[in-house]
Image (cartoon, helix red, strand yellow):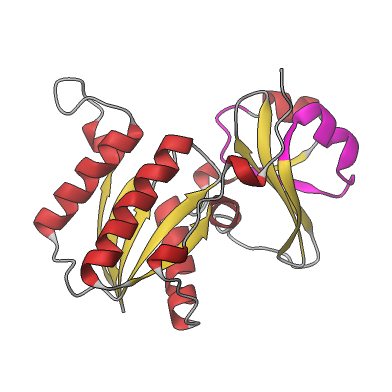
């Protein structure tokens, strides 16, 4: 199988080709210098794809895996627009990858008996969250750490890509930081290949973003 990956997450956006043991990946961080190609992550994602396609042929890909959120509104829209445009042009299907699953997949090992709460930065101090039991989401939404600390069970393990765990530790969570564990590229590659083998593919017209409409935000 040959898959195109489009990841629009703020911290580690990239485009990639995965074909068996052959891999080619271009990160948005390559364009960080102002004198190179300025712009926000969504702009850089377009440059990632441009560089990738100049080095690797995508006409013979079998499917396109793309992150669908939750996350940056603009990033999700740009990533999906790129994925859908290519899918329509090449008559290929899409593998939607939600960012909760992607983050959880960065753990070296997932214990099925554990309860995990995956956190993704929203508009701080709120986080998007998804509670997993038996590797299935049983609850999701957006909330502050203070309220989550009151509602999550004492045995819940918090998982996320955290730059600073100070506030999390203050809430007495058991925390697993994925930052130095499985890379986002490796995790997404594994998820995409598993979904392709299981034939969990979606027509481009049916792929929907996972963002604000799926969460209840309190008005100021």
Residue at left 23%, top 37%? 30
- Was residue 148 drawn as part of the magenta stretch in this picture? yes
Where does residue 7 sit, x and y in percent of width and height?
39, 50
Front one among 104 and 137: 137
Residue at left 68%, top 42%? 215
Q: Residue furthest left?
A: 54
Q: Quadrant of the C terminus?
A: top right
Residue 175 figure quarter: top right
Tell me if residue 187 comes above or below residue 76 in the rendering: below
Q: Residue furthest bottom?
A: 198
Where does residue 198 sit, x and y in percent of width and height?
50, 82
- Was residue 102 drawn as part of the magenta stretch in this picture? no
Residue at left 89%, top 44%? 154
Query: Would residue 90 appear left or right of 174 to someone viewing this image?
Result: left
Residue at left 58%, top 59%? 108
Do we see residue 141 in this rendering? Answer: yes
Residue 93 figure quarter: bottom left
Front one among 140 and 158: 140
Tell me if residue 3 comes above or below residue 106 in the rendering: below
- Tally the marks: 0
Which contiguous range is marked in magenta?
Answer: 142-164
Do we see residue 23 in this rendering? Answer: no
Tell me if residue 49 comes above or below residue 212 in the rendering: below
Query: Would residue 7 appear left or right of 215 to someone viewing this image?
Result: left
Where does residue 125 sit, x and y in percent of width and height?
67, 23
């Amino acid at each position: 199988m040959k898959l195109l990956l489009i990841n629009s997450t703020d911290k580690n956006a990239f485009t990639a080709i995965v074909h068996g043991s052959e891999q080619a990946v271009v990160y948005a961080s390559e364009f960080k210098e102002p004198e190179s190609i300025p712009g926000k992550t969504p702009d850089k994602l377009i440059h990632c794809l441009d560089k990738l396609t100049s080095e690797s042929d995508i006409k013979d890909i079998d499917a396109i895996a793309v992150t669908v959120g939750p996350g940056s509104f603009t990033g999700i829209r740009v990533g999906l627009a790129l994925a859908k445009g290519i899918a329509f042009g090449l008559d290929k299907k899409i593998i939607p990858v939600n960012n909760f699953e992607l983050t959880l997949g960065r753990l070296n090992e997932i214990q099925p008996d554990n309860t995990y709460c995956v956190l993704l930065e929203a508009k701080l101090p709120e986080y998007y969250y998804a509670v997993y039991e038996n590797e299935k989401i049983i609850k999701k939404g957006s909330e502050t750490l203070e309220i989550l600390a009151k509602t999550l069970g004492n045995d819940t393990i918090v998982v996320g890509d955290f730059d600073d765990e100070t506030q999390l530790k203050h809430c007495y969570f058991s925390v697993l930081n994925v930052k130095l564990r499985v890379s986002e590229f490796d995790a997404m590659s594994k998820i995409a290949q598993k979904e392709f083998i299981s034939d969990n593919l979606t027509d481009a017209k049916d792929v929907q973003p996972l963002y604000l409409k799926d969460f209840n935000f309190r008005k100021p």
